[in-house]
Amino acid sequence: MSRSGESPFGRCVFREFSKTDSTTLCFSDHYLAYCASGSMRLEIDSRYFFLQPTKAVWIPAGKQVTTQIPTSITCCSILFDTTRFPEHDLLVKTIDLTPLARHMILHCRRWSVEGCIIDKAAESFYEVLASIVIEQMDAPTSDWIPRGQSMLVSRAVDLTIEQHTKPVELAEIAVELASSERTLSRRIVDETGMRWSELLRRIRIIAARELLTCSELQITAVANAVGYSSQSAFNKAFKLESGLTPGKFREQFKSSNWS
């Protein structure tokens, strides 16, 4: 404990998780979810959030979270005491992690052992990490997908995620859902604020960013793996979503991934 009677400012949860289907959780502390390796999907407030090694998801206390882990992952996440963490807007956000932030989170593993005492040095370290997190929360990223409110739109989003690796058209999804393409298109915009083509692009680029950081696939192979047959179309879509070309994105990740 940092001071007599006070809870620690922060605590680290470091462990490996095997592939699982959905699991529902709720945290009494603020939670910074981070995958040091692998990726996972979180469903919170009718949105899907995607965790990758360059990102973290900030989850305010009391939020119900449904997790899905498609492959084994290494999780290194931080729990922050709600009474001591600085005031913020209590919104779920996906944030970029700078190299400094990633390595600070991983450094917290030293305090993840059960029974480890959170001393003054640890308290100061968690406070600095909190200030970095808050700074990044002011510029959240787009690594999330709106799921929609109705069963029709939710199923359409799920089917788009399932089929994004191949040529897919909204008309095909509409037929599968016994809806007209026009009706489904309108409902998607009404419920998500995005056109279906924008949803598909974001889904594909989120998947591409994961492959660029977690695999050694050539960029052309990454484009094909996420449903793009044209390299130029992939580059254009990637830059629209990420602000960088795929090559520059991978280069920046590798150069900042300190050993």
Image (cartoon, grey):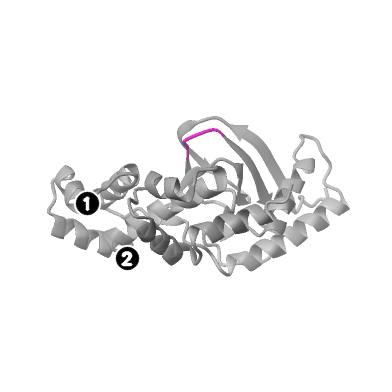
Q: Which mark is residue 226?
A: none
Image point 42% across, 60% down: which residue? Answer: 235
Query: For this rendering, which residue is in front, 78 or 213?
Result: 213
Give the label, 2 or 1, closer to the camera. 1
Image point 62% across, 52% down: which residue? Answer: 32
Check disc 2 and report the residue beneath it. 193
The answer to which image quadrant residue 117 occupies is top right
Is 208 rendered above or below residue 69?
Answer: below
- Tell me if mark 2 has few (under 14), some (14-19) or many (20+) residues whose alpha carbon lies within 10 angstroms of its own: few
Query: For this rendering, which residue is in front, 145 or 4?
Result: 145
Query: Does the residue at mark 2 contact the one at mark 1 (Cβ under 8 Å)?
Result: no
Apparent side of residue 141 relative to residue 122 in the rendered image (left or right) = left
Query: For this rendering, which residue is in front, 202 or 135?
Result: 202
Tell me if I can see residue 208 in this picture: yes
| Secondary structure beneath label 1 | loop
Upstream in sequence: badge 2 or badge 1: 1
Q: Amino acid at mark 2?
A: Gly
Is 83 rendered above or below residue 217?
Answer: below
Q: Amino acid at mark 1?
A: Glu
Task: Quote the CA–CA distance across marks 2 and 1.
Answer: 19 Å
Segment tinted magenta in the rendering? 68-72
Q: Position of residue 128 (x, y in %)?
A: 76, 61
Q: Position of residue 64 (x, y in %)?
A: 49, 47
Check disc 1 and report the residue beneath it. 169
Q: Is residue 70 magenta?
A: yes
Q: Position of residue 229 (x, y in %)?
A: 32, 50
The answer to which image quadrant residue 176 occupies is top left
Q: Position of residue 55 (x, y in %)?
A: 57, 54
Apparent side of residue 36 relative to residue 160 in the rendered image (left or right) = right
- Tell me if mark 1 has few (under 14), some (14-19) or many (20+) residues whose alpha carbon lies within 10 angstroms of its own: some
